[in-house]
Image (cartoon, rainbow, N blue to C red):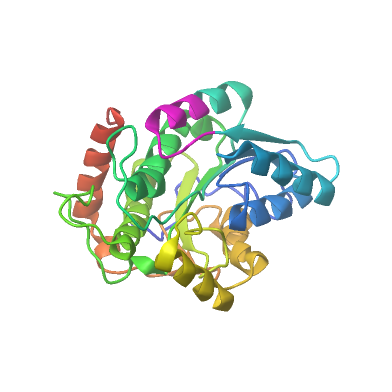
Amino acid sequence: MSRAGEMASGAANPVGQDLDGKTVVITGATGGIGLETAVVLASRGARLALVGRDRTRGEAALARIRGAAPGVVAEMHHADLSRLDEVRSLAETLNAALPRIDVLLNNAGGMFARREETADGLERTFALNHMAYVALSLALREKLVASAPARIVNVASEAHRGVTLDLDDLQATRGYAWWPVYRRSKLANILFTRELARRLAGTGVTVNCLHPGFVATGIGNNNGGVYGLGMRLAKLFALSLDAGARTPIHVVTAPELATTTGTYVVKSRVTEPSGAARDDAVARRLWDQSLAIAGLTDS
C-alpha cells in the first residue's frame, strides 16, 4: 500500500471545516498547541473530550474554551498518560461516555532532562511520547472504526531526522541523553503512524502525523537547572501557540486529507519523513514490541 495513497473507502470529507456533530478527543489539552487547537475546533462546532493531567489547569482550559465558544459541549478527563493503567482507565471512560469518536488527536508529550522510570518500569519519555499514543489509539480503535469515516492524528516532529531506533534498548538503559531520546520518541511516532495506517486500511479510519513547528509551549518547563533555562531561552525564538496549532488543525479538518493515510505533514503540506521513518520492517518490529509492553494482542 502506498502510505500517501488514498483509502479505498473514498468517502466525502468526514470532518471538513464544519465540525458540527463531530467528536474530537485531544490529549495534552490543558495548554500549548493542544489547548489552542481545542479552542479553534470548538469554534467550528466540535464536541470535545479533552485529556490532561492537572485538574486546576484542566478547569482553566475548559473556562477558556467555553468563553471562546459559548454553547460548546466540552469535558475534561484527567490521566497521567505515562502510566499504562491510567491510559486503559481513560479509554474505558471514553468508550463508555462517547457515542462516537470522529477524531483522536494524540498530542501529549514531554522532554525530561534526567532518566526516570514510570510505575510500569518504562523510561518516561518513551512511555509518554510513544506508548501513550499506542495504547490509547488501540483501545479506542473499535469506536473509531464504528464512527468511520474518522481520523487519528499523531503529533510528531522534524526532530526525528538523523536518528534511528535501537530496538534492543528502547528504554535508553545504556546511556541517557534527553535530546536523542526525545528525537527517537518522535521517530517512533512516525513509524507507529505508518504501521497503524497499514493495519487500518479499508476501515475508513485514516492515520496521519505532523510536525507543528518549534512552538513556545510548556514542554520541557518541568525541568530545572541549565536545561530548563536553555529551553526557556530557546522559546523566545519559537512560533506562537496559534501558529503552532495551524498544522494540527489542518490535519484534523482538511478535506484533501479525508482519505489520505500514513503521511507526515509539515506546515500543512504532506512531506517525506527521513529514511529511518520509512523503514517498514522497523515499524513492524516496533509495533510488536510496543504491543508486548502494553500487554496487547495483535489484530
Q: Residue furthest top?
A: 96
> Which region shows up in magenta?
79-91
Q: Residue furthest bottom?
A: 237
Is 90 in the magenta?
A: yes
Q: Is residue 129 visible?
A: yes
In this orientation, which residue lies closer to the viewer: 283 or 180? 180
Q: Quadrant of the C terminus?
A: top left
Q: Is 225 or 232 nearer to us in this picture?
A: 225
Q: Position of residue 71 (x, y in %)?
A: 85, 40
Vertical placement of residue 240 versus 51, above or below: below
Task: Pick the residue in front: 64 or 113.
Answer: 113
Could you tell me which residue is drawn at 62 percent across and 27 percent down? 98
Residue drawn at (43%, 59%), measured in percent from left and top? 156
Residue farthest to the right? 70
Identify whether 21 is placed above or below 285: above
| Apparent side of residue 293 relative to residue 19 in the rendered image (left or right) | left
Most common SS among magenta residues: helix
**Can I make out residue 157 in this image?**
no
Counting from the top left corner in percent of width and height, residue 139 is at 43, 30
Whether residue 196 sits left or right of residue 145 in the image: it is: left
Q: Quadrant of residue 33?
A: bottom right
Q: Residue 223 magenta-drawn?
A: no
Count the marks: how many? 0
The structure residue drawn at horizontal position 45% and vertical position 32%, both measured from the top left corner, is: 87
Left or right? Give the position of 156 relative to 10: left
Residue 46 percent across, percent down from the top left: 72, 44
Q: Position of residue 125 (x, y in %)?
A: 36, 50
